[in-house]
Amino acid sequence: MAEPEAAANGAAEGGGPLFRRLCIIGLGLIGSSIARVAKERGDIAGTLVACDTGPGVAARVAELGIADVVETDAAKAVLDCDGVILCVPVGGFAQLMAEIAPHLSPGTVLTDTGSTKGSVLRDLLPLLPEGVHLVPGHPMAGTEYSGPDAGFATLFEGRYVILTPPPGTDPGAVERVTELWRSSGAMLETMDATTHDKVVAIVSHLPHLIAFTICSTADDLAQETQEQVLKFAASGFRDFTRIAASDVNMWRDIFLNNRPALLEMLARFSEDAQALGRAVRWGQADFIEDRIHRGQKVRRSLIALNQA
Amino acid sequence: MAEPEAAANGAAEGGGPLFRRLCIIGLGLIGSSIARVAKERGDIAGTLVACDTGPGVAARVAELGIADVVETDAAKAVLDCDGVILCVPVGGFAQLMAEIAPHLSPGTVLTDTGSTKGSVLRDLLPLLPEGVHLVPGHPMAGTEYSGPDAGFATLFEGRYVILTPPPGTDPGAVERVTELWRSSGAMLETMDATTHDKVVAIVSHLPHLIAFTICSTADDLAQETQEQVLKFAASGFRDFTRIAASDVNMWRDIFLNNRPALLEMLARFSEDAQALGRAVRWGQADFIEDRIHRGQKVRRSLIALNQA
């Protein structure tokens, strides 16, 4: 394993750019933001290759001038690269990996930005060539916009990026991915994929599921009530719709690729909601007060952590 | 009915203040904000009486100088008033009405700021003296703070106030309450109590129930996961906690006094959440996409209405 390790560490130690030739696959909000950071800084990629098969995306990326080379063939795009970042919705990982795996060079650092990490290990590890280093990652950043025009170089500043390298991953490879995100202004955390999936299920996936649901529930009300819901939305409903304007493909894939953790959190939440509903029905004031107190407690904890 | 009608219209038409002697009962966030508006403007109340039985509240109101007369006995406070506003949590309405009803003068306009309106009619109408005009109201305004120090004169500016006068209510009385809120900068809507309770159940009460619940669900997770929930809250969870820091007594009373509408909306929402959970479990991509599309649609409607 001496040679791949040396390769994984090489560029970072040599004083040159972090990656000699870096390929970003998927130039949506996240991928095009990484491209912009790399172009602006200059010390991340010697040559920056962008690959996207979406209609018109490659042409737009060329127009925007945020990559040195633009490709629509992933197998060709990854050739001779020492860094590859997958930024497509997680539902596309298995097929994409089947396309690129035979063309990855030994020593290449392979990372991604998918929102579910168990599914990424499931889809990538079986096809991972000997000597290629997989360091899965998840930048906790986003806006309600998508596509190559939506990206911007400061998207990751002050945001968390969670890395979930499987046990035994080459430390040099982890360090290079860490350095990539540090250069983007992000804060790094490392955890195992299962913990990651459970945490994002409660902090992100379940809130999105609830947001989509309450919009649908409101949308099913009689026309007159619907209009009043929109008119009086500021009373609380509005806060729940803020995250409902999200990319359809990305969120469909997230839900389908974090099934066990999301369904477990939905089950826990549903039990808790039913218990509170039951307390309302039977007039159990103490139970209701306890729930409100716990809401206040969690909110205060967030304020204390400057996360509010 | 000629005399009470004349009284209900009198002050408004005479060029003097809207109410000769106005009593506010309950000097929390809402009540103390109304008091501040009345003191600042001068044309709302000839004499402003404030009444609160909470420990130290009356003394604090006197210190703040936001009323002309401060009382702790509601029966005494309403004597000789031509306007009375109940601003206590809705759970206290029945008992408060029993105390004040014998002391209300014919022609008095009685209004309130309770968040549930069916319960207000249920608790006030049976005790309403002949010639006293009941015009229930609900200002859709608030902050996460409570108490007499939390109020401010601009709280109602640009916010909706919903009036739910029962059929046959004296139009002059409705006009005076309307004028009170217009003077506070609010926008007026009128609807029946049942419609009001259904609308606020979906736009406000259900979102609060969900917010309290998801905080409890997160609070029940293992300690390590809890810390990570707080750390990564920006991914969506945070938006749900924003409304969880709410006054305990007020929200307990709201839940207990809007039972049928809240439980119906919770049931609809729960069915919809389970349906989406089922689609996740069985990999029904079309169903999931449809729900995300509907979330986007509702969000776009809010943006179009400048309510986002």
Image (cartoon, coloured by chain):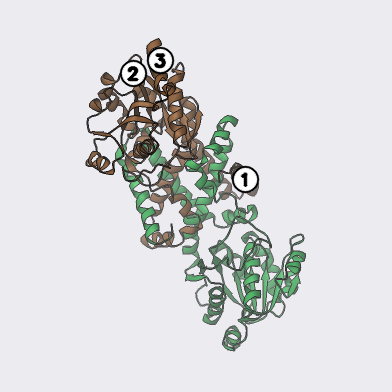
Chain colours: A green, B brown
Point out residue B26 in the picture as x, y percentages from the top left corner. Answer: 30, 35
Instruction: Name the residue nearer the viewer: B109 or B219.
Output: B109
Rendering coords of residue B283 (x, y %): 61, 50
- SS at circle 2: loop
The image quarter containing residue A42 is: bottom right
Which of marks 1 and 2 precedes in the sequence?
A: 2
Seen from the viewer's position, the closer of residues B143 and B195 is: B143
Judging from the image, mark 3 belongs to the subunit labelled B
Residue drawn at point x = 42 percent, y = 40 percent: A274
Where on the picture, by quarter, is residue A82?
bottom right
Image location of residue B29, percent across then percent down: 35, 41
C-alpha span from label 2 to label 3: 19 Å
Please give the chain letter of the residue carrying mark 2.
Answer: B
Q: Residues within 10 Å of mark 2 (few under 14, many from 20)?
A: some
Name the residue carrying label 2. Answer: B128
- Pick the residue in front: A181 or A118: A181
Question: Which image quarter is the N terminus of chain A in?
Answer: bottom right
Q: Residue furthest top?
A: B1
Q: Is residue B141 left or right of residue A104?
A: left
Q: Is residue A239 above or below residue A106?
A: above
The residue sitting at 57% across, 60% down in the picture is A142
Mark linked to residue B300: 1
Q: CA distance from mark 1 to mark 3?
A: 48 Å
From the image, state whether disc 1 or disc 3 is nearer to you: 3
Q: Is residue B74 above or below residue B142?
A: above
Q: Nearer the viewer, mark 2 or mark 3?
A: 3
The amino acid type found where label 2 is placed reads Leu
> Which residue type carries mark 3?
Ala
